[in-house]
Amino acid sequence: MNESCLSIKYTNHAIEFMAKRGITEEEVEFSILKGETIESYPEDKPFPSKLILTFVNGRPIHIVLARDEKSKKCFVVTAYEPTLDKFELNYKTRKRRL
């Protein structure tokens, strides 16, 4: 289980791309609660972020989530369905670029 969030805010980018990609807030919130952190970006600003993987009805979903440690607010940066041209079959490992 991932870290808890006292509240979840969505960036404009996340809202736009969730709509384009058919990803719902319920799927994102499920992912935050039950997903697996597969990459961490501790140097991201203004807050550290991470890449979360989950499967919703068999569909892989990646969420980039930033968390303000002080307030425990979480910010959904983006959400997308990873593709096999960029990730291995496990959807956790990025493919190496040649």
Image (cartoon, helix red, strand yellow):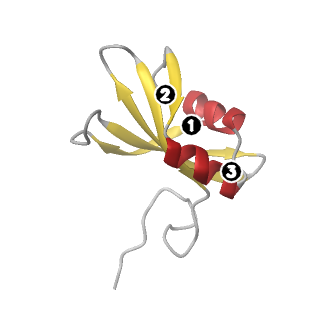
Query: Could you say which is closer to the camera, residue 17 or residue 98?
Result: 17
Badge 1 density bin: few <14, some 14–19, many ≥20, Cα 10 Å: many
Residue 38 location, x and y as percent?
43, 47
* Outermost bottom residue: 98
Q: At 51% across and 43% down in the image, what residue appears?
A: 12
Query: Could you say which is closer to the camera, residue 96 or residue 18?
Result: 18
Badge 3 density bin: few <14, some 14–19, many ≥20, Cα 10 Å: few
Badge 2 density bin: few <14, some 14–19, many ≥20, Cα 10 Å: few
Mark 1 touches mark 2? (CB < 8 Å)? yes
Mark 3 touches mark 1? (CB < 8 Å)? no
* SS of the residue under disc 3: helix
Image quadrant in which you'd find residue 50: top left
Q: Is residue 32 above or below residue 52?
A: above
Q: At 60% across and 50% down in the image, what residue appears?
A: 16
Image quadrant in which you'd find residue 47: top left
Q: How far apart, in angstroms, are the residues tagged by discs 3 and 2? A: 24 Å
What residue would you read off at disc 3? 19
Q: Is residue 5 above or below residue 61?
A: above
Query: Which of the marked residues, 1 or 2, is nearer the chain's N terminus?
Result: 2
Q: Amino acid at mark 2?
A: Asn
> Can residue 63 be seen here?
no
Q: Is 47 on the left or on the right of 43, as rendered?
A: right
What residue would you read off at disc 1? 35
Classify the position of the C terminus by image quarter: bottom left
Q: How far apart, in angstroms, are the residues tagged by discs 1 and 2? A: 7 Å
Q: Amino acid at mark 3?
A: Ala
What residue would you read off at disc 2? 2
